[in-house]
Image (cartoon, rainbow, N blue to C red):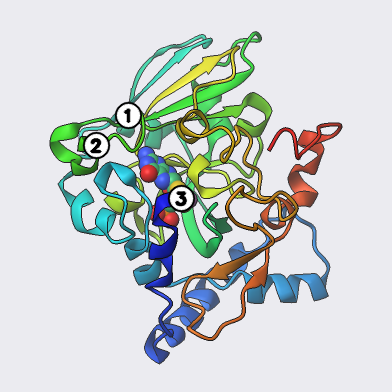
Amino acid sequence: MANRWKNDLTRADATPYEAFLNRRQIMAGLGGAIGLGLSGVGSAAAASETAELEPNTWEEVTTYCNFYEFGTGKGDPAAYAGQMTTSPWSVEIDGLVDRPGSYSMEQILEAMTLEERIYRFRCVEAWSMVIPWQGFELADLLDLAGVQSEAKYVAFETLYRPSEMPGTAYRVLDWPYREGLRLDEARHPLTIMATGIFDKPLPNQNGAPLRLVVPWKYGFKSIKSVVRITLTDQEPHASWNVANPREYGFYSNVNPNVSHPRWSQASERRIGGGLFARRQPTTMFNGYADEVASLYEGMDLAKFF
Ligand SMILES: Nc1nc2c(c(=O)[nH]1)N[C@H]1C(S)=C(S)[C@@H](COP(=O)(O)O)O[C@H]1N2
Ligand SMILES: [Mo]
């Protein structure tokens, strides 16, 4: 991510009119899902929220990606992730759970109810998108396995299959890609496991067939193509945090007041906004403060960044 900082200036293209019209239609179709009953916003706020939550295009979401297992360029995942085998797929759920084991994708989908979530998505590199996800709450999957009372954290692991992942030939990270959440973060109703975008199955480059989405944290927390979920009482190994703890904290909550050591996090560039679009201010917890700020009450957010 950090070393590709310059790269994200290359796709600052204007939105074609056709794509804009498409987007309006998508908005009309998804209108009912906005708000999700979680924020309880008033009508003025809802109006601005609606404008702000105008989804990016399919093209933007599926061609401007970070998935380093396929290379560090923004276009690499779209170019190379097609070779990743995603069926059959299963997720090993282990550690402090009552029903550890290998859960097949079919088993998981049968047990879960899919719903739509339109979320802001903010990368630590200071670009952002709005993405219409389909998926289910992670809490429901955790309940399927039965979390034991000693569990305090949830650890996640991405598939590591070098034969299908050209980017893993480079030791950019200590593969497999790993991430973690505190259990209360993992159980928060905003935290989902996504299976689709735009009402279509998740493309490989976006983390098929199952990826985490934590909308109030920097994008790298939202680990893709998950094959293992471990309940533990220790703070999990998180790839970026271990690679560079000074730059990437374990929490990595979106916070405009805590700069990355090499750039400000006070504003962001909305992908697809066009060449002359103004950067927009980054908001605390990526706009989800009403829902999640209480999780961090009493914590020094500059220290636990
Ligand atoms: N396994 C894995 N998960 C990952 C990454 C990655 O390189 N490998 N990149 C992260 C980063 S930095 C971001 S911004 C998001 C990008 O998600 P998107 O490409 O679907 O927008 O995925 C996150 N999850
Ligand atoms: Mo990111």
Name the spot of residue 36 as percent of width and height, x first.
66, 56
Sequence-first disc among 3 and 2: 3
CB under 8 Å between callouts 1 and 2?
yes
- Give the residue at mark 2: 168
Q: Residues within 10 Å of mark 2 (few under 14, many from 20)?
A: many
Which residue carries the number 1 mark? 175
Q: Nearer the viewer, residue 71 or 51?
A: 71
Residue 62 falls in image quadrant: bottom left
Instruction: Identify which residue is drawn at 65% across, 40% down.
Output: 189
Q: Residue furthest front?
A: 262
SS state under label 2? helix
In the rendered view, would you say 17 is above or below 280?
below
Q: Tell me the kind of residue under disc 3.
A: Ala
Q: CA distance from mark 1 to mark 2?
A: 7 Å
The residue tagged with tag 3: helix, strand or loop? helix
Whether residue 292 is situated above or below residue 21 in the rendered picture: above
Question: On the image, numbered disc 3 is attached to which residue?
Answer: 2
Residue 48 x, y percent position in the rendering: 73, 75
Residue most toward the bottom? 17
Element under label 1?
Answer: loop
Residue drawn at (46%, 11%) of the image: 99
Type of the residue with mark 1: Trp
Figure quadrant of residue 227: top left
Q: How many marks?
A: 3
